[in-house]
Structure formats: structure tokens, C-alpha cells
Amino acid sequence: MTASIIEVEGLTKSYGGKRGIIDVSFQVGEGEVFGFLGPNGAGKTTTIRVLMALLRADSGTARIAGLDSWDRSLEVKRLLGYVPGEPSLDPNLTGGQLLEYFANLRGGVDQAYLKTLIERLDLDTSRKFRQYSTGNKRKVVLIQAFMHRPRVLILDEPTSGLDPLNQQEFDGMVKEAREEGHTVFLSSHVLSEVEKTCTRVGIIREGHLVRIGDVAELKDIKRYEITISFAHPIPVDAFTKLDGVTDVETLRDGSAVRLAMQGAADAVIKAAAQYPVVSLTSYEPSLEDVFLRYYERDGEAPKEAAGVA
Amino acid sequence: MWLRSIYLKTLRDYRVPILGWGIGMGLVIVSPMASVSELVRTPEARAALVSLAQTFVWNADAIAADTVGGYATFKIGIFIFLIGIWPLLAASRMLRGEEDRSSLDMLLSVPRGRVRVALEKLAAMWTALFAMAVIIGVLAFLGRTAFKASFGLGDALLFGLDLALFCAVIGGVALLISQFTHERGPAAGTTAGLLLIFIVLDMVHRVIPNTDWISRLSPIYYYNLSKPLVPTYGASLGGMLVLLALAVALSAAAVWLFARRDVGDTVPLPRWLRLSDRVAGPSRSLPEREWSLRSVYARSLGMIAVPTLWWTLGIAGGAAWMVIVVQQVEGKLKTLYTDSPFLTDLIKNLGGANAEFNAAFLAAMFSLLPLLLMAFAVTQVNRWTADEDDGRLEIVLSTPQSRPVVLFGRFAALATSTVVVAVATLAGAALASSATGIKLDSTNLAEATLGLVPMALFVAAIGYLAAGWLRSAADTGLISFLLAAWFFITFVGPELKLPEATLKLSAFYYYGTPLLHGLQLANVAVMVAVGAAALALGTLRFARKDIGV
């Protein structure tokens, strides 16, 4: 990892006795695209809002570029672009007015680049914010985060509400930011999104950072399901001991199986090909489902996950 | 229990207004009761009061104005606009407000029909209105006991019921109009405009003979048919039934339209009534030269500009009207003033002793101006706290603008607006004075009007301070209560022989009677110092608090 630009040490925040985050520590190197994964309510937004100096930590420190995010918040914010989880803006201003307003508040925004971003995300700037669809509201917020080419981008579930085309455009923008040496801290509860965009990930659950490492290391928690329907009942034993299969469930009197998978599906496809297949569907469970199975089935986190942070 | 149905949940949301508005309006009714028995100590004073009330008959019916119940009914008639504010705000927010926040989508996803959802909400508002009516009735009855009036508890409750029915009609109007607007603000504004028109329509038959048919177009006419606090007049069942029918019809029409239109959209208007549709294609341009987008202060000014215009018209127009009225009723007031020790005391308390009558009376009336400008400040404090509650400060605070700069930007915009209102009020009063020939000391007039600014900013600073701990509704409720309490202390306190120390607790005490004596520098200094301290503490708190928590 390169020199750290985001350093979080022992960060704890509660809301009047209710859990927020507990003793969270991690570092993000300059130029990294860091994914912050966790189910809903795990503490992702709390961590981000502490980094943004919108919340004051009960204990611990959060530093960006060596500056304490609370004590030196003004200098920190000059370095940042931010997309909140639930963006709310003046409903009576047009998209263009909002972007111009935030450009003025930030200062030093290259208008030509701003217009390029507007073109790129295909935003109609003449409509009022309240008239925008969810996806277009998200575009306004994304553009204001990227428009000043910030050194660090802090994005809280940034693609929520974007259509696949714009998600692709967003991926491109993140990639370019990374190529320019900028750092991206991106929270998500969608495993595949983080896998596609990020180089390293941290996983937070119930306020605790339970795991941190390279994206490649996610494979041991990455699970998915395959449901195969056959023309007639088949012997389920044909799948139980295959590589990658962790669980088998028989459906419709044996003429269909639901397989819990981890890793490659090659062996399963080859085994299924022995029988007349009617349909095959693959499903990636939500991160919450993954956590539910991975962390709670055995009552506690696996050893390799616990204490890694 | 309160979350078992939409009706109960909505009623739960209304619990603070039920108490706050009910008690507040109750006190507005009791206050004139406190004064009237003192006003009519001699037959001459009684005759003068009746004559004076007749002078204002264009504004409100003056029936048995020399009795406790009659005078209270007459006074509440003058303030009928205030009575209508809560129902018009609540009804314009009821469906359209929820659509603004997209929370209605969720509510309509539960297995309940749209009509039922709307009716449950409407029923909750009506229940709230009738609960307020009971509070107002009980307070009126307590006032009757204290000031020895002749009406009974039933009469007092009927009085509350008449008010509630009138409010239900105004609520129905707002609910209906909100089906045609995209946001709740225009619905509330249009209803407020209609309320003013209703007031004018109701006035017509009292000013121009044989024009009853015009006044019958106004629901206020039917409200005025009942005067239960005047035992010789009584309540009009017919009038109340008309109000009930109007409320039901307007609400039913609103619910019917709501059930048939798209959620988030409006009832389609005929083509000739529609504003020109957007025909231009998508734009990629940016308003690079727009002044109101250059800073937090400029943006705040842009946000406050339209409300400032309306409040300026109201306050400056009110001040000019006061000057004109004084000239018109001078003779009658003088008789009453001479024969009523109470009025003499009241005007001396409010308008100042040892002054010419006109000036003293005008000074007493001018003491209402700070109340109005402070109410404007309350609305702007509410906007500030609502912005934080709704998350609209989040991205602003992610820019390199410090929290104090953001807060001061908003406060400075409010300060600028109050200066505009004060200067326009000065101009309005000066013009009216010059047109009517009423002589006013120009320095004192300038101090009386410009002195409104520290009053408004004082209450705003208190609101900004409290916003450090309270959410929008609680903060607005707190400073509204403070305003009501200060009003009560200053306007009724001297008659209740409240000690000087208590009178000094009211912000109005420090405004004094600048029209007669100029602003007292020490008092202004106290206001400014306390206000500045509150703003400084509020800024410190805002700089350290968790945003949106």
C-alpha cells in the first residue's frame, strides 16, 4: 500500500447510547479505490459522516492527508468530494443552479470540465431538483462531487438509483480518478459493485470492522446460488461432493436442485450436463444474506476473519 | 396505541399544535375579557367603547361590545385571519406535504385505499380542531368566571365549535387547492390569499347596504351569524350547518380529486388555465452569472426574498393603516380615553405617559409591529432548522465553508430582510403621516421602525441557539411560545399588576415606546447584548454539534 491518505484509528461513535461504530481502525493509501462494505445499519454512513466532520467521534481519530478531519475540517474539505447516502438539496433550484452554487462555494472549479461531466452523465440542467427522477438527483450529486477533481472522493452508496448505463459511466469516472492518482473511498452493500471497482475492501458489521484486505480475498465470503431444473428427477448425490458446492437443496421432488456455491461453477456445470437441463439460474445473494450465512450460521465469525482489522 | 392507524398517527402528530394553538387562541380570547370590565366603568366610557367598536364595524361585528362576551367576540373577529393560519398550514401539508417528502408513496403501498388514507388524515385534523375548540371553550369559560360574564359553559363550547367549523372550512379550501399545486407552499399561500378575500367579502355588507348576497360568499359571514358569548344573540344553528356543509363539500371534493389524480402530480387543468408547458429540450447550460448562487449569504437572500416581500407589504401596510386609523377615530377615542381609567392606564403602559393622546394611542398600536416582525423571524428560524432536519445542509457543509460561515450567511440574510421590512415600514408610516396630517416626530418614528430590527434578530438568535439541541418542530414551538408569553406579559401583565421584574422578562419591555420617547439606548443595548450572546453560543454549538442527529 502507498502512503496513507485516510487514517482511522480507534474510531467510536454512539447516538445517545445506541450503537454507531465501535473502535474502527483502517488506513487507505493514496491512489487507492477502497470499498467499504457492510449490510444496512452496519455503521458505513456513520464512519463516512465522521470522516466528513458532520459527526464528532466519541473517541479515536480520523485523519485525511494527515489532517484531523474534525479539528482541520476546512482544510480537509478542500481536498474532498462527497456524495451523501441520502442526498437532499434545495428542491426549488434547477440542476444547473445547484451545480453553479456548489462550484461557487468550492471555488476553483473548471467550468469546461463541469460541462463535460454534465454531458457525460446526460443531465438536463434546466429542471428543478424536485422534478428529477431518483437517478437524475443522484447524477447532480455525483457531478458536484467530481467537478473540482478532488484528491479524495468519499462516496456513500453512490450508484444507488443509477441505471446500468450511468453505472458504467460512473465506473469510468472512478477509474479515471484512480488513474489521475486520486483516492476513492466508496461504501456499498453490493458485493459485486465493490469487487468490480475497488482494489481493497473493509467490511463492517454491527459497528465493528470485521475484515480488511484485497478484493481477491473476498472470494471466501463470496457466495452465490445456482438453481437447476431438470426434465425429470435426478440423483442429488451427483452434486453434493462437487468442488465449490457448499450446500444442496432438493426441489420439486428431485427434478430441481438449489446449490449454495463458493468458487468456480465448472464442476457443477459439467455434472448438470449429464442430465436433461430445462433451466439454470444463478443468483447473487445480498450482502446481508452473505453475512447472515457466513457470520451467523456458526454463531461467530470464522477465525480468519476475526481480528484481521 | 398511537401507531395503530393512520388516523391515530396523524392525531399524534397534531398533539403539540392541539395544545399550543388551543391554549394560544384561548389566551387571545381571554385577554380582551380581562380589559373590557375595566374599560366600561362609567356610562360615558361604556358609550364611547360601543361607539368606538362601531367605528371598526367594517372589520368585525360589534354586538354588545360593552359586555365581556361581546367584546371578546368583537376582538376575535378582528383577528380571524390568525385563527385560520393553523388549519390552512395543516391541510396544505396533509397530502401535498407528504407527497413533497415522498412519504405518501410508502403510505399508499399499504393495503388501504386512497380515499380511506385521505379520510383518516382528514378525520385526525377535524378531531384536532374540535379538541382545540374544547380547550378554547374551557378557557373562555374560565375567563367568564374570572371576569364575571353572563354566558355559560355550553355557550363557551359553542363558541369554540363555531371557530372549529370555520377552521374546518379553511382546511377544506387548502386541501382542495393543494390538489392543484405541486408543492404545499403555493397551496398555503393561495389559501391565505383567499382568506383575505373572504375577510373583505364579509366586510362588504357591513359597509355597503343591501350587499348581504356578496358577504354570503364568504364563510366568515356564516361564522359571524353565531355569537354564543353574547347571551342575547346566541348561536345560529343554520350558520353552523352551512359551515359544516361547506367543510364537508370542500373536503369531499379534495378527496375525490386526490383519489383520481397521479400521486406527485396535480389535477390536470383545462388548457386555457395552464401555464405554458415546457417546450424547450434538455439543456446543459449553467447559470454562471446568477448573483444569488455566489455565496451562502447570497443564496440565503435569494431564498428569503419572496417571503420578505409579503411580510414587508403586511407590516409596512399595517403601520400605514394604523396611522390612518388614528386620524379617523380620534374623537371617539378621546372620550373613551377620558372616561376610562383602564384605557388611560393601558395606553400609558403601552403608549407612554404624559403624551398627546394621538401619539400615545399610535405608540400603543405600534407596539404590535415588533410582534409581527418577530413572527417573520420565527418562520425563518423554522426554515433553518428544517434544512438541517431534511439533510439539506449536508452537501453545503462538505464544501470548504466553515460551519460559522454557513450559519452567519443565513443569519445575515435574515438581518438584511428585517432591515428592508423596517425601512419600508418607516417609509409607509411617514407617507401615511404626511397624507393624513398626523404629526409624528420623525426621529422617533425612525427609531420605532428601525428599532424593530434588533427585536426580530433577538428572537432569531434565541431560535438559532435552541436549534443546537432541538429539532425543527420543537424549536419553532419553543420560540413561538416565548413570543406568546412575552406578548401576554407586556400587554396583560401591567393590568394583572405583575411585578416589574416579571415585566422585564418580556422582550417587548425593551422595545418600549420609541414613537414617543425614542429608543432607550440601555434597553437596546440589553437586547443586542443578549441576542449577540445567544447567536455566539448558537454558533459555537452549531460548530460542534452532530449534523442531522
Image (cartoon, rainbow, N blue to C red):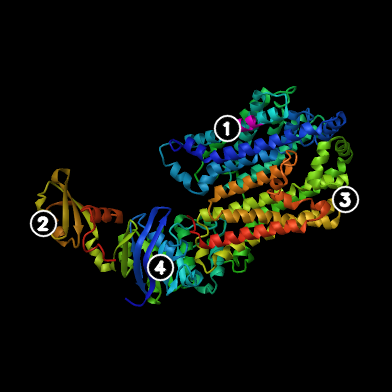
**Residue identified by numbered label 2:** A241
Query: How far apart are labels 1 and 3 at the CA level?
Result: 47 Å
**Residue identified by numbered label 1:** B131
**C-beta proximity under 8 Å, tags 3 and 2:** no
Crowding near pointer 3: few (<14 within 10 Å), some, many (20+)?
few
Disc 4 and disc 3 on one polypeptide chain: no
Let me know if residue B323 is in the magenta part.
no
Q: Nearer the viewer's eye, disc 4 or disc 3?
A: 4
Q: Is B242 above or below relative to A70?
A: above
Q: Looking at the picture, which amino acid does disc 3 mark?
A: Ala
Q: Chain of mark 3?
A: B
Majority SS type along the magenta span: helix
Query: How far apart are labels 4 and 3 at the CA level?
Result: 68 Å
Query: How far apart are labels 4 and 2 at the CA level?
Result: 48 Å
**Residue identified by numbered label 3:** B435
**Residue identified by numbered label 4:** A61
Is residue B401 visible to the viewer in this orientation of the structure? yes
Q: Chain of mark 1?
A: B
Q: Chain of mark 4?
A: A
Please give the range of residues in magenta. Answer: B134-139
Q: Looking at the picture, which amino acid does disc 1 mark?
A: Ala
Mark 3 residue element: helix
**C-beta proximity under 8 Å, tags 4 and 2:** no
Mark 1 residue element: helix
- Tell me the quarter of the image containing the N terminus of chain A: bottom left
Query: How far apart are labels 1 and 2 at the CA level?
Result: 71 Å
Disc 4 and disc 2 on one polypeptide chain: yes
Q: Looking at the picture, which amino acid does disc 4 mark?
A: Thr
